[in-house]
Amino acid sequence: MCYFFIGKHILFFWSFYSIIDNNGTTWSQVLTFTIKPKVSITWTYNENDVIPIDDVTKEGVVGLLNISSNKPVKLSADVKRFSEDTPDVEYLKIGNRNIPLNQPVQIQNKNLYGDLVISFDIKENTEVSEFTILLEFTFYPF
């Protein structure tokens, strides 16, 4: 056996030599395979548009979001505010599924699809002008 280091990876090279007699000869090797989780995201919305917030529900719909994976995964969402004047986010929803902030939720059926809805904590008689947030999704193996 011979091995080489390439970056973080080790490559193994095996050589097999045998004299073949009338009964033949056999060589076998145990191999282990895995399928790593892979996430695909399709988000349909116009990045140049300012997202309106409904006066009554305090929700903004940020387009259509489709998250799919080849294996079940966990998803965590976080929202970063750039200013103290930015209202807090109460919750996120994708379709009819609530996504709590900073708490991983399981996506067992490998697909999450629907409108991305962000609800803000805007108090009555509060004047809110245009603001910006950063929405961050983190995916974990199941």
Image (spheres, rainbow, N blue to C red):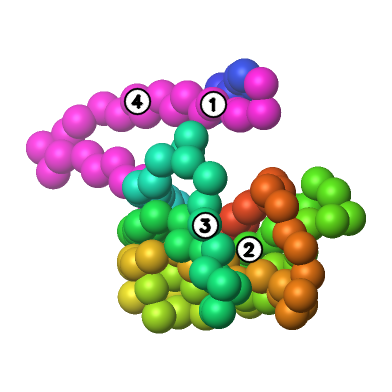
| Distance CA(mark 3)–CA(mark 1) | 54 Å
From the image, state whether disc 4 or disc 3 is nearer to you: 3
| Distance CA(mark 4)–CA(mark 2) | 55 Å
Residue 138 appears left or right of 15:
right
Sequence-wise first label, 4 or 2: 4
Residue 86: x percent and y percent? 78, 57
Sequence-wise first label, 2 or 3: 3
Q: Amino acid at mark 2?
A: Ala
Residue at 55 percent of width and 63 percent of height: 53
Q: Amino acid at mark 1?
A: Leu
Q: Which residues are magenta?
A: 7-35
Q: Which residue is mark 2?
A: 77
Q: Which residue is mark 4?
A: 17
Badge 1 density bin: few <14, some 14–19, many ≥20, Cα 10 Å:
few
| Distance CA(mark 4)–CA(mark 3) | 72 Å
Badge 2 density bin: few <14, some 14–19, many ≥20, Cα 10 Å:
some
Q: Which residue is mark 3?
A: 52
